[in-house]
Amino acid sequence: MTRGEGKRLFSQFLQLFFAGVAQGCVYALVALGFVLIYKATETVNFAQGDLMMFGAFFGLTASTILGWPYWATILFAIVVMAVVGMMIERIVIRPVLGYPTFTVVMITIGVGYILRGFVTMVPGWGTETYSLKTPFGDSLVRLGGAVIAADQLATIGLTAALCLVLYLFFRFAKLGVAMQATSQNQLAAYYMGIPVQRVNMLIWGLAAAVAAFGGILLAPIAFIHFNMGFIALKAFPAAVVGGFGSVPGAVVGGLIIGVVDALAGFYLAEGFKDIAAYVVVLFVLWFMPSGIFGETVRKKV
Amino acid sequence: MRFIFKTAYDQDIRLFQHGGQMFWYGLLGVALLAAPFALSEYVLSQLHFICIYAIVGLGLMLLVGYTGQISLGHAAFLAVGAYTEALLQAAGVPFVVSISCAALFSAAVGLIVAIPALRLKGIYLAIATIAFNVIVEEIITRWESLTGGNQGKLLKPIELFGYKLTSGASFYYVCLALTVLCCLALINLLRSPTGRAFVAIRDSEISASCLGINLARYKAMSFALSAALTGIGGALYAHKVTFISPEQFTLVQSIEMVTIVIIGGIGSLHGAVLGAAFIIMLPQGISIAKGWLPEAIPQVGLQSVVFGLVLVGFIIFEPYGLYGRWLKIRTYFDVFPFYRRGTFRRQRTYLRSERLR
């Protein structure tokens, strides 16, 4: 192998790596939603991907129909989805808390079906495929011989910013600390004067808002479509790889799955792209049944 | 109100508890046998699907409803059964042998899945089964020399003891016979020590292992039996639709199969059959209702919304499903006027820490 060829291969790898990280950021945002909700209500929200899709459609409405700028679009989608998330918690999830895991999983799957069907019925949304305009456009950035789309860099940057905001929120804000306390031990939190049910509702709102953010970030990479929520099926492996109860784990897991996905799609035979994430998750479950950052929980009889 | 005065231990596990049950099940049997003479070809075709989904539902009920394990990947077993049947039929193997092979091979695959699944609980198990479903689907798509890939496989009608079963009625009798056989097999299994061990595992793994139940062994057995039943369902499904391709065995199919169990009522064999009937009739009901609704609403979206609403509604308002509703109605009249609302109240359990109501 000549030196030039080695350099070419490296820049190719770099390019794939960045594409993978950008995709992984979206997985990470969806996985973050899973983890937030799981920690708060012991519910795994299978509708997280559909919440993301729903948020992306609200963003689409704001940007194309109302003609708002990109930043206002993001804000609008986040606010609307926070309200939607809180409504779902209040109406659907609260009555079934404490039912077997399986039942609660199925109810969130049902919510996903409703959201997906609802989107097809709204005039102007329907079953078409849309794309969302971003201020970054189609410009490209050169980095050590690799060519990277500005959209991808923006996705990575915005995700990092969101993670920082969330970190500060959970670390310093009163509500964030209350959310942490609630997810660790509800009864103890209640005795400390935290309105547990209201906090749980807010956590659902937060998770839905994060999902909406992810949906808008995904729009330049993929397209907006009523089935785009199925991408969440790859965020499950992400959440599991990181350990289902861990917020930093979700981000790390998302990035791992995104990169594995991109590399497998290029270097391995056709078809491996679709299953790489699942093979990884089976391996992780085999060797570390509670993920990388997960904690093992024992239940009293 | 009926009092059953028990004079022998055998009465506890007798197939029919009293004469009334024998009468009603007998009547149902006669009605089912007579169905092809009274019903149109279209309704009969729906009955085929109900039988097939009932078998699949029974398999899933054993795993989900009686052993308490989650599976969101059962479409993979359906696929294994369907493709085994298709390949063996193409190779000229008689139906009785090929459907047995479909069941056995599905059971073997079920055992392979069970080995990693034994260590997993709750949501981790659900995700592992999803992963399994996706991987099997991909293998079927890519292994073109064996499965035909996306081009799919065609099946010929069943040939049984030299007769070609081309008519709807003859296929119906095959489906019905297999459904009844599967039901009886499961009823028998559930009143045996093995079945009781499954139920013990569902109710509490710790207590079950303290009672000397080998958790790994029984969980693996439950997975294998459930997969075998689903494989039989898959073989019949392949014959019913006569054309199988990978996109029929996706996660969406798995979810629909689980819905049978939820809507029918977790933890009852009746529920599996009732749930199957409900799931098959739901799209028919929707297309009838579609006639009264404005034209702009697409069929796909409407079906999805109704499906979701039914699922959510059942879980919130009737967690015991259709069979649970029937039990409540029956109990109401049985003990009239002393029915109490709390009779069927469900105990809530929380996984991690003390929780608030």
Image: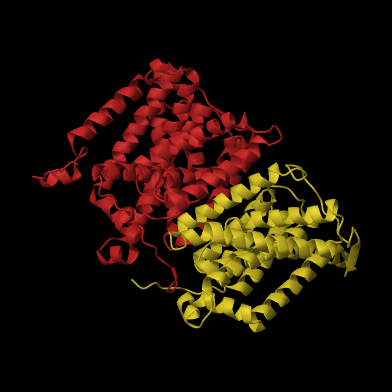
* Image spot of residue B82 (x, y percent): 49, 35
Q: Colour of chain B?
A: red
Using the image as rendered, state which of residue B20 and residue A256 is in the foreground.
B20
Chain given the colour yellow:
A
Residue A226 lies, with reference to residue A161, above or below; the image says above
* Image spot of residue B17 (x, y percent): 19, 39
Residue at the image position 58 percent from the left and 76 percent from the top: A179
* Picture quadrant where residue A250 is located: bottom right
Residue A167: in sight, yes or no?
yes
Using the image as rendered, state which of residue B318 and residue A29 is in the foreground.
B318
Residue A37 lies, with reference to residue B274, above or below; the image says below
* Image spot of residue B188 (x, y percent): 26, 42
Residue at the image position 73 percent from the left and 72 percent from the top: A162
Looking at the image, residue A128 sits to the left or right of residue B283; the answer is right
Residue B250: in sight, yes or no?
no
Looking at the image, residue B268 sits to the left or right of residue A288; the answer is left
In the picture, which quadrant includes the N terminus of chain A? bottom right
